[in-house]
Image: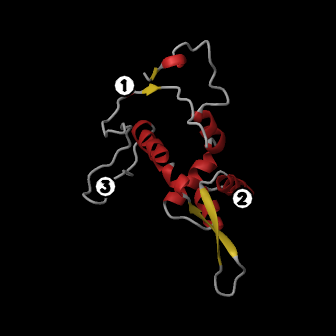
Amino acid sequence: MTVLQGPLVDRDTWSPVGRCPIEKTMALLGTRSAMLIMREAYYGTTRFDDFARRVGITKAATSARLGELVEAGLLVKRPYREPGQRARDEYVLTEAGTELMPVVWAMFEWGRKHLGDTPLRLTHLGCGAPATVEVVCAQGHPVPPDELGVDLRKPAPSS
């Protein structure tokens, strides 16, 4: 169990509603299609029609989800033109989008472990060993759930 610290210990004196990073992330990515578009972006998909086909959603849903992910700064539109065709946009991961990858891979690993057998595995290309997603502290120590705390920090004053 994760340990709440400081003023967060008394759960009756505060509410995370509207301020919780999990809530905000789920508001953006809480749809099946948004997460699968991000999965496809990690696999190298950049073209609108490829996202729609690989995720299995309508063009209208693809357009809506891509627009939301661009607006959130996870993807960026980049123009391209095939010879003899009109200019179009492709969708490329931003730094923020790339930083979301551990969340997607943690879901991959959880689903692989708990929702049925699959031949898919994460591996380290450098040595071939299985790869995992885990929480580590800034000192590089693995942090098991019973050693993970949530603290309330005041934002640094802006200059």
Q: Choose mark 1 or mark 2, whichever is in front.
A: 1
Residue under circle 2?
Answer: 63
Residue under circle 3?
Answer: 124
Please give left or right for residue 102 compared with residue 67 in the image: left
Q: Which part of the image, by quadrant, shows the C terminus?
A: top right
Q: Earlier in the sequence, mark 1 or mark 3?
A: 3
Q: Earlier in the sequence, mark 1 or mark 2?
A: 2
Check disc 1 and give the amino acid type. Answer: Glu
Q: What number of labels is visible?
A: 3
The residue that appears at 45% across and 41% down in the rendered structure is 111
Numbered circle sitting on residue 147: 1
- Quadrant of residue 29 in the image? top right
Check disc 3 and give the amino acid type. Answer: His
- Binning the other alpha carbons within 10 Å of mark 2 as few (below 14), some (14 to 19) or many (20 upward) gives some
Check disc 2 and give the amino acid type. Answer: Ser
The residue that appears at 39% across and 37% down in the rendered structure is 135
